[in-house]
């Protein structure tokens, strides 16, 4: 069934390559990263490489997460004149999985309370936290759509904040040989980021550069580290569900954007899913992955993806209007989404098509 689209009205992004969405996305477009030695060492004794957000002061722990999240929300609202958080717009905040090593105690409550203090306003009663890591962003989009469909609000902010640059977190991933080091090429570079996206239902919004047309969710029977043969069943089901909601087929998608982070499992899963689903020849079906520039940012991944696409639509550098996005956690949770960008190029094509149709209709008459 075709679902009602979500309009992306504005975005905010704080990352290792910029403190606003405009800065971060410009750096990502140019392939710039901020990968450098951190203050942590690995089991081999070498300094670990990461992508840290550099703020005005050397905040640490949950305090830094609060500062990053509040700045991303502020950046998002600054990009949408006339929108005021002030208890009117619910905030759906995505955070790290509850079982992740190194997760700060009472993190969810500390983040909501801290963001209220930083922004100087009370949050909407429907504000909530989704502690589901990368997939949490897609769950937040689904909840935002439900909030608006039920008439509780006409605008919702979906945000995500996360950091892998925590001693206990890095120690756990290093012990599992999952960090990219000189001795391990099958690993990721840890990062930290915060992103925010202002959403509205399509009927309520003014013309938006980006529409989320479909969402899909599934479970993977062979998750990371299970030792079971990987067929990407979960990702295939999630993509099919998202395409069904959007009323599209895979051949209608121009490009992809995903959370692949340098680990072989994620690239293999993405390749298997597309191989099983794509039945039409496509000359190009490239894959974007923001982790290349900002590192692994967990719960901030989907807001970062949408920021990239929204900025690309605004400045007319997307390689095509329809993107397939997909994400997966280390456990069995998988999610996919379909977005359609509106650029001056697509508007020109649509206008030309409508004009041609009008001419044909007058000729037939």
Image (tube, rainbow, N blue to C red):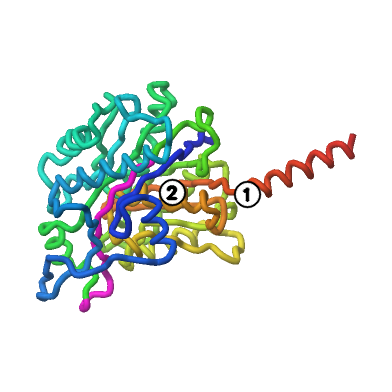
On the image, the x and y values in percent for residue 258 come to: 40, 56
Can see residue 220?
no
Residue carrying label 2: 237
Gap in Å between the C-alphas at discs 1 and 2? 29 Å
Query: Please, which residue is most extreme toward the front here?
Result: 56
On the image, the x and y values in percent for residue 39 come to: 12, 65
In front here: 316 or 45? 316
Image quadrant where residue 187 sits: bottom left
In front here: 82 or 37? 82
Label number found at residue 79: none
Tell me: 151 left or right of 16.
right
Can see residue 259?
yes
- Residue at 12%, 70% (x, y): give it: 42
For residue 180, above or below residue 249: below
Residue 184 belongs to magenta span: yes
SS at badge 2? helix
For residue 132, above or below residue 3: below
- Residue at 20%, 52% (x, y): give it: 56
Label number found at residue 346: 1
Residue range corresponding to the magenta coloring: 182-197
């Amino acid at each position: 069934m075709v679902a009602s689209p979500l309009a992306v009205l504005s975005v905010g992004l704080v990352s290792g390559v910029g403190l606003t969405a405009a800065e971060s996305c410009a750096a990502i477009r140019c392939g710039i990263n901020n990968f450098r030695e951190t203050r942590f060492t690995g089991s081999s004794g070498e300094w670990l490489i990461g992508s840290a957000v550099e703020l005005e002061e050397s905040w640490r722990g949950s305090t830094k997460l609060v500062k990053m999240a509040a700045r991303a929300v502020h950046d998002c609202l600054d990009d949408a004149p006339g929108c005021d958080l002030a208890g009117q717009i619910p905030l759906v905040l995505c955070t790290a999985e509850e079982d992740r090593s190194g997760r700060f105690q009472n993190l969810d409550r500390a983040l909501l309370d801290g963001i209220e203090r930083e922004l100087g306003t009370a949050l909407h009663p429907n504000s909530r936290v989704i502690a589901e890591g990368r997939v949490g962003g897609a769950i937040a989009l689904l909840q935002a759509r439900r909030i608006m469909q039920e008439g509780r609000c006409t605008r919702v902010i979906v945000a995500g904040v996360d950091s892998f640059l925590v001693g206990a977190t890095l120690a756990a991933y290093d012990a599992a040989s999952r960090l990219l080091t000189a001795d391990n090429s099958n690993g990721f570079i840890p990062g930290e980021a915060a992103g925010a996206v202002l959403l509205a239902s399509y009927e309520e919004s003014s013309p938006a550069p980006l529409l989320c047309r479909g969402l899909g969710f599934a479970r993977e029977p062979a998750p990371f580290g299970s030792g079971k043969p990987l067929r990407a069943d979960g990702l295939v089901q999630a993509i099919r569900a998202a395409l069904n909601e959007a009323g599209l087929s895979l051949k209608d998608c121009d490009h992809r954007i995903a959370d692949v982070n340098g680990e072989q499992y994620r690239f293999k899963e993405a390749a298997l899913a597309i191989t099983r689903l794509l039945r039409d020849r496509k000359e190009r079906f490239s894959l974007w992955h923001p982790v290349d520039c900002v590192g692994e940012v967990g719960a901030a991944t989907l807001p970062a993806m949408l920021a990239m696409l929204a900025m690309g639509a605004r400045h007319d550098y997307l390689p095509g209007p329809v993107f397939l996005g997909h994400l997966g956690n280390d456990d069995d949770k998988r999610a996919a989404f379909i977005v359609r960008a509106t650029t001056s190029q697509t508007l020109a094509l649509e206008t030309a098509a409508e004009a041609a149709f009008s001419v044909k209709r007058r000729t037939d008459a």
